[in-house]
Amino acid sequence: MEEIIFKEVGKRLKEAREKKNITLEQAGKKVDVHKSTVLRWENGKTEKIKLPILETLAQYYNVNPVWLMGYDVPMKRELYKKKDGLNNTVIEIPILQTIKSSSDYLAQENIIGTIDVETRLVGNGDDFFALKVKGDSMFPAIIEDDIVIVKKQADFENGDIVVTIINEDEATIKKVKKSSNGILLQPFNNNYEPLIFTYDEIESIPVIIIGIVKQLKREF
């Protein structure tokens, strides 16, 4: 199934590039690869293409990035926005299965779908992703299989709920507090202990904050 999806991505890459009369060489320069790499992508010869590259090419070709990823949505970028049941303007962003620092968490194989989010929150969606929650450390506020909408950023304020990678392991979601000595990552579930790190430990372990949770989506 992944191979079929990627071949569709390749077809759409070629269609969008040719429609804009952009050469393989121009496309390659835009994302800092050789034109032969772009040709392999278009021919479905490799699955090693990262989501940030697709997003850059989508902007360059002026097409909907979700369409470029092979999903059944309009091709035109201006039609990317739509209305939800409450007449809010929404936009689709990718849902990630997991986040690990040792892998490209925005790789295509880690995207398990898309979700509609209000544009008043995410704008054009470029600085946001959605993450499917694992575990119960944030119960009862956030439960397993919830979808959280995350803004990509490393800075935060006290009380923010952050997505953090610790010691290059899978990301965890916790409420963060900072002091003059370091930070505290607080779970909501009393069965879990808070995680406390000095600023030296943040650098040496390392502890990397990759985003701030901005919204929770839950199916009932």
Image (cartoon, rainbow, N blue to C red):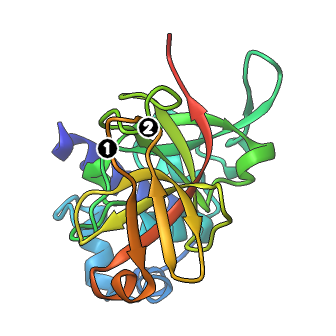
**Can residue 18 be seen at all in this image of the molecule?**
no
Residue 13 on image: x %, y % = 42, 60
Q: Answer few, some or many: residues within 10 Å of disc 1's Cα (few below 14, many 20 plus, some between 14 and 19).
A: some
Point out which mark residue 213 bears.
none
Q: State the residue in front, 134 or 140.
A: 140
**Residue contact at pointers 1 and 2, CB within 8 angstroms:** no
Q: Answer few, some or many: residues within 10 Å of disc 2's Cα (few below 14, many 20 plus, some between 14 and 19).
A: many
**Can residue 180 be seen at all in this image of the molecule?**
yes
**Residue at the spot 67% in from the left edge and 51% down from the top edge:** 77
Mark 1 vs mark 2: give the one in front. Answer: 2
Instruction: Name the residue at the top extreme.
Output: 220
**Residue at the spot 46% in from the left edge and 89% down from the top edge:** 29
Q: Estimate the spatial distance between the alpha carbons at disc 1 and disc 2, rounded to whole Å.
A: 18 Å
**Residue at the spot 48% in from the left edge and 32% down from the top edge:** 142
Give the tally of numbered discs: 2
Residue 88 on image: x %, y % = 81, 28
Q: Quadrant of residue 216?
A: top right
Mark 1 lies on residue: 97
Q: As shown in the figure, which amino acid type bears the numbered disc 1? A: Gln
- State which quarter of the image contains the N terminus: top left
Mark 2 lies on residue: 138
139 displayed left or right of 37: right
**Residue at the spot 75% in from the left edge and 46% down from the top edge:** 121
Q: As shown in the figure, which amino acid type bears the numbered disc 2? A: Met
